[in-house]
Amino acid sequence: MKVLVAVKRVIDYNVKVRVKADHSDVDLANVKMALNPFCEIAVEEAVRLKEKGVASEVVVVSIGPKAVQEQLRTALALGADRAIQVETEQSPEPLGVAKVLHKLVEQEQPGLIILGKQSIDGDNNQTGQMLAALANLPQATFASEVVVEAEQVKVTREVDGGLQTLALQLPAVITTDLRLNEPRYASLPNIMKAKKKPLEVVNPADLGVDLSPRIRQLKVTPPAERQGGVKVANVAELVDKLKNEAKVL
């Protein structure tokens, strides 16, 4: 079984995000970039399926400029077999990403498609669901456990009320949650081997997909600075402040 994993290049989660002076966007100049944490979990799960003998090949795909090859090489170092870059200078929206992945699913015919549930930059949590709809495939989101049995995959997913287990007929789309696994570190030998693994570059036009934006970003502002707390002398003063200043009572 072939597993297709979508990954995204994002600002490293340890970096404090800065907004441009004109508030047009986030400032990416000289900022450390990394593999989206949820995508890293998706790669790890695919590699584990291969190590168990369930998957025969792991293919990773990313959409973006040449710089995304760095993250694709990271995924290859983690254990993926080959990579596909869909090259574009635009910042694709979730629907555009889903359309690109749909075309690649048609070409690659994977038995399982795994994505992170969301990226830590846009936090949209939309691409996996849109892909499943476009490809008319069963889906399970927020996966905390994945077990492949014959032609089915059982997915335990985290929901508001606890845990829910779904049985999906393959092929299927799965989006990963934080508790699914703990990604491994890429060893130096694997990093060196990743440089020789195949990385194919295609254009959206080759796939017949138009990535023109449908959403216009008007303004980006940083969150408001947190104000310091104050001490109160007694309960009466606390109630007064909650009622008249915070206006929560």
Image: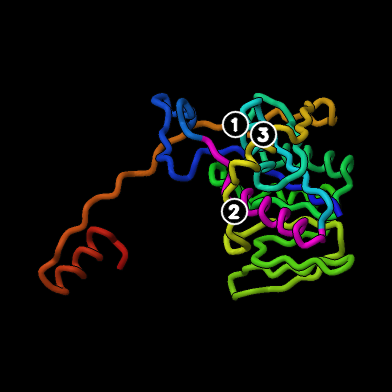
Q: Is residue 146 left or right of residue 232?
A: right
Furthest toward the front, the residue is 189
Callout 2: SS: loop
Q: Main secondary structure of the magenta part?
A: helix
Classify residue 49 by image quadrant: bottom right
Point out residue 93 in the picture as x, y percentages from the top left corner. 66, 37
Q: Residue at x 63, y 41 (%)?
A: 189
**Circle 3 residue:** 92
Q: Amino acid at mark 1?
A: Arg
Q: Is residue 11 left or right of residue 130?
A: left
| 237 versus 139 height, above or below | below
Q: Which mark is residue 216?
A: 1
Q: Earlier in the sequence, mark 3 or mark 2?
A: 3
Q: Amino acid at mark 3?
A: Pro
Mark count: 3
Q: Is residue 138 left or right of residue 93?
A: right
Q: Tell whether position 146 is magenta.
A: no
Point out residue 218 in the picture as x, y percentages from the top left corner. 52, 31
Q: Which mark is residue 184?
A: 2
Q: In this rendered view, identify the residue nearer to me: 47 or 27.
A: 47
- Residue range (magenta): 33-54
Q: In this rendered view, identify the residue nearer to me: 64 or 196.
A: 196
